[in-house]
Image (cartoon, rainbow, N blue to C red):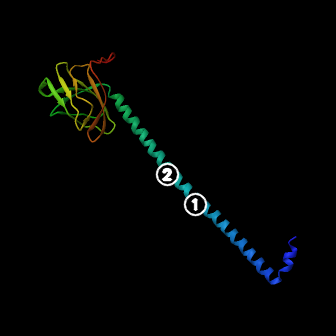
């Protein structure tokens, strides 16, 4: 069918066309092979980078999980009430836990405006050490809470979570709350 067209074309033109077709085919084969090897090289490099990133991420997650388990264990061990003294409107704590607050010189009223010694994520629960002491917990730049709260008997409690840089955010409060198992 195409023979009549080729018969019209001279032999010299046929040679040139054959050479151009051959060089075009070789050109496209070269490009295909080049992209194939380039893709294979990039896949290998990308795969190595992905494996490295995944390994690093896995190690990071394992470290975080270990840290959280250690923190949870320390919080579980902090179920006993620890005593702390309110001084200069502040208390110094030793991390997460439950604390009984007393005042300096057994004063009847004390004002709590700042808490020191906490790390990001530490959770604390505060109570008055005695029914004879009124510890007034006040909202400040360091104690983020809606309103002041009186710890004036052993059944009042307030809980905070440390948000970093000695800033504590109130979790909950309970007035005249009674703990059935541990008093």
Q: Quadrant of the C terminus?
A: top left
Q: Residue at x 26, y 21 (%)?
A: 156
Q: Secondary structure at mark 1?
A: helix
Left or right, 27 with reference to 165: right
User: Mark 1 sits on what residue?
Assistant: 42
List the single residue furthest toward the top.
Answer: 180
User: Mark 2 sits on what residue?
Assistant: 53
Q: Earlier in the sequence, mark 2 or mark 1?
A: 1
> Where does residue 146 sit, x and y in percent of width and height?
27, 31
Left or right, 130 with reference to 1: left
> Where does residue 24 sit, x and y in percent of width and height?
71, 73
> Where does residue 84 sit, x and y in percent of width and height?
21, 29
Nearest the viewer among 50 and 4 is 4
Left or right, 85 with reference to 41: left
Task: State yes or no: discs 2 and 1 in contact (Cβ < 8 Å).
Answer: no
The 10 Å Cα crowd at callout 1, few under 14, some 14 to 19, many 20 or more, is few
Residue 29 versus residue 71 in the image, above or below: below
Q: Residue at x 48, y 45 (%)?
A: 58
Q: Quadrant of the N terminus?
A: bottom right
Q: Secondary structure at mark 2?
A: helix
Res. 64 image quadrant: top left
Nearest the viewer among 42 and 22 is 22
Res. 150 image quadrant: top left
Could you give the CA–CA distance between mark 2 and mark 1, rounded to whole angstroms? 16 Å
Residue 86 versus residue 131 in the image, above or below: below
Mark linked to residue 93? none
> Where does residue 94 sit, x and y in percent of width and height?
26, 34
Res. 12 image quadrant: bottom right
Q: Residue at x 19, y 27 (%)?
A: 136
Residue 12 versus residue 115 in the image, above or below: below
């Amino acid at each position: 069918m195409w023979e009549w067209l080729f018969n019209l074309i001279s032999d010299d033109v046929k040679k040139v066309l054959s050479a151009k077709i051959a060089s075009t085919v070789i050109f496209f084969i070269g490009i295909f092979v080049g992209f194939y090897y380039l893709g294979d090289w990039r896949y290998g490099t990308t795969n190595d980078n992905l494996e490295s990133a995944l390994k690093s991420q896995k190690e990071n997650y394992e470290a975080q999980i270990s840290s959280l388990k250690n923190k949870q264990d320390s919080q579980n061990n902090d179920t006993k009430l620890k005593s702390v003294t309110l001084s200069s409107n502040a208390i110094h704590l030793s991390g997460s836990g439950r604390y009984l607050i007393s005042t300096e010189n057994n004063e009847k009223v004390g004002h709590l405006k700042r808490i020191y010694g906490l790390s990001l994520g530490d959770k604390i629960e505060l109570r008055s050490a005695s029914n004879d002491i009124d510890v007034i917990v006040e909202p400040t730049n360091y104690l983020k809470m809606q309103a002041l709260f009186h710890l004036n008997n052993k059944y009042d409690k307030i809980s905070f979570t440390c948000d970093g840089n000695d800033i504590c955010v109130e979790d909950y409060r309970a007035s005249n709350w009674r703990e059935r198992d541990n008093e």
